[in-house]
């Protein structure tokens, strides 16, 4: 695996995964982060 840069997008996604105890679908991530991220980034 390559280097993971600490961008705002990565930080937001990591927060979602840390707060969740089960798997999160891409569609659910898009719904949750729609106002913060472009769906292409997700």
Image (cartoon, helix red, strand yellow):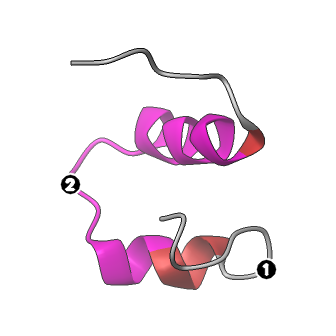
- Residue 13 x %, y %: 54, 47
Q: Which residue is mark 1?
A: 35
Q: Earlier in the sequence, mark 2 or mark 1?
A: 2
Q: Is 42 placed above or below 4 here?
A: below
Q: Which residue is mark 2?
A: 23
- The disc placed on residue 8 is none
Near-viewer residue (32 or 19): 32
Asked which secondary structure carries label 1, the reply is loop
Question: Tag 1: Cα neighbours inside 10 Å, few (<14), some, or many (≥20)?
Answer: few
Residue occupying the point 47% across, 65% down: 42
Q: Is residue 23 magenta?
A: yes
Q: Determine whether label 2 and label 1 are within 8 Å by CB.
A: no
Near-viewer residue (13 or 20): 13
Quadrant holding the N terminus: top left
Residue occupying the point 58% across, 39% down: 10
Image quarter of residue 6: top right
Magenta range:
9-29
- Residue 31 x %, y %: 54, 84
Q: Is 25 placed above or below 34 here?
A: above
Residue occupying the point 35% across, 84% down: 27
Q: Is 42 placed above or below 34 here?
A: above
Near-viewer residue (23 or 1): 1
Question: Looking at the image, which residue sits at the far front?
Answer: 2
Residue occupying the point 78% across, 68% down: 36
Near-viewer residue (40 or 21): 40
- Residue 2 x %, y %: 31, 18
Asked which secondary structure carries label 2, the reply is loop
Question: Tag 2: Cα neighbours inside 10 Å, few (<14), some, or many (≥20)?
Answer: few
- Residue 28 x %, y %: 40, 78
Q: Is residue 2 magenta?
A: no
- Judge left or right: residue 5 versus residue 40: right
């Amino acid at each position: 695996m390559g280097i993971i840069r600490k961008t705002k997008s990565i930080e937001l996604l990591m927060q979602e995964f840390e707060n969740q105890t089960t798997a999160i679908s891409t569609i659910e991530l898009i719904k949750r982060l729609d106002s913060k991220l472009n769906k292409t980034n997700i």
